[in-house]
Image (cartoon, grey):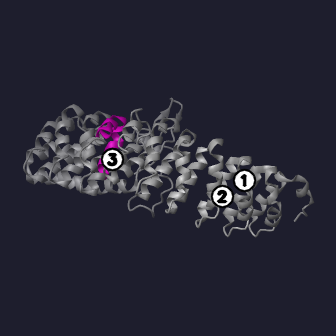
Amino acid sequence: MLGKEELGPADLPFPVLVDPVFTASATYGTAFGLYGREWTDWPGAFVIDRDGVIRFAYRAGRLSGNYADTDHLLQVVDGLGEKQKLIAALRDRDARIYQAAAPALEAIGPEARRAVPALLAALKEDNADVRAGAVAALCWIVPPARTALPALRQALTDKDERVRRLAVEALGEIGPDAGPAGPAIVRVLTDGDARVRTAALYALDQIGPAAVPGLLEGLKDRDPRVRRASASALPRFPRLPEETVPALVAVLRDRDPEVRLAVVRALQRLPARGEVKKAAVPGLVEVLKDSDPRARQAAASALETVGPHAAAAVPALIAILKDEAVEVRRAAVAALWRIEPAREHDRALVLALVERLRDPDAKVRQLAAIVLSVLGPRAEPAVPALAAALKDSDPRVRGSAASALTAIGPGARAALPAIIEALKDENADVRSSAKEALQKIDPDAARKVPRR
């Protein structure tokens, strides 16, 4: 297997080949030049069997993630032996089907594709072992989409877990041409077997953008588990159609609380610019009132990713700065930091942040000071509270308070005694921040302070 260079032999229970100069990957035809001049440095993982045949390839340039998931790679490696045994067992179960499946055990050649019709027919056999052996062979033969899709899609509903798992794996190997099977794969995301669900996620990855319409359709499914799974899977794709955000927004009021939570988290993780996510702001503001603190936190975090385009959410975020859940308060202050609120909210915002400088949670206190530093001179009414924060028990809060006073500038002169006292702080970073604040607020006073 070719994988992350950071992984060492002690981290994985199978051999790892690090290939920094593409010697092995070029040998297997998996390395390629960028614009015909340079080798790419895109990470990739390849599972190779003992006969030297690539049985699984994960190329980050084509798929959504930067690296293949270790748990999935372990599942793929475990599956090597399983597939070999299932195919070999066909020798005793059904000699005719074994004759068709046998080429999958060797390096794949033209004779393997000629075997596809017999293997697809075997998926209708009553014996589950025969069906599992046939679909195991199909995983390694990678049959043409136009002939395999209907049978493999039907196999996703097989009563045997092995057949379902191997069928979805085969669809993933087909790649983008398996896009029409997307809705059926989405339903497999709710399978009772964890290995089936994992295989389904990676099948969607390998199919790529062609799988997205199935996920968007899944958001409307009658089964809340399908709606939840569809929302959770969407952020896996680096490029999504423009209708993705509106489709998620339409489900923000879902009657199922777990679906709502999955949708909000999807909007948070969605790889889209803030201006694209702006359409979700009104719906996310409503979720800030949700009875579930997980949903309120996720909504605030999603608004943080929208950034300045979420300016309309500022009043609602100010309101939940008093939330009883510390995770919600943290997320709300962090969102206000990224949104950079307009002047019209200064009075209410500064008053709320001054109160948060006395929050029981140190992280909330630190974030409140950071937001005040973003406001700069507009945060002048907070000077007394920031001066008091220079004596906070947490050095991160003290340092952030000094930075906020620096940003306020000459308007923070009332804090000079506290700043001068902070020059003797036990923490070097706090002393440095206090010195910077003094120089910004009163350069003459800074020159009179003895050098240490």
| Residue drawn at x 35%, y 41% as measured from the top left | 206
Q: Earlier in the sequence, mark 1 or mark 2?
A: 2
Q: Earlier in the sequence, mark 2 or mark 3?
A: 3
> What whole-number distance in Å separates the C-alpha atoms at marks 2 and 3?
36 Å
Q: Which residue is mark 3?
A: 254
Residue 442 colored in magenta in the image: no
- Most foreground residue, 422 or 73: 422
146 shown above or below 283: above
Q: Give the image quarter of residue 185.
A: top left
Q: Position of residue 76 (x, y in %)?
A: 32, 53
Is the magenta region chiefly helix, strand or loop?
A: helix
Q: Give the image quarter of residue 81.
A: bottom left
Q: Which residue is mark 1?
A: 381
The C terminus sits in image quarter: bottom right
Amino acid type, label 2: Val
Q: Which residue is mark 2?
A: 354
Q: Seen in the image, is 248 located left or right of residue 401?
A: left
Q: Position of residue 174 (x, y in %)?
A: 28, 38
> What whole-number distance in Å separates the C-alpha atoms at marks 1 and 2?
9 Å
| Residue drawn at x 59%, y 46% as measured from the top left | 338
Amino acid type, label 1: Pro
Labels 1 and 2 touching (C-beta < 8 A): yes
Neighbour tally class for label 1: few under 14, some 14-19, many 20 plus, Cα within 10 Å = some
Magenta region, residue range: 198-217
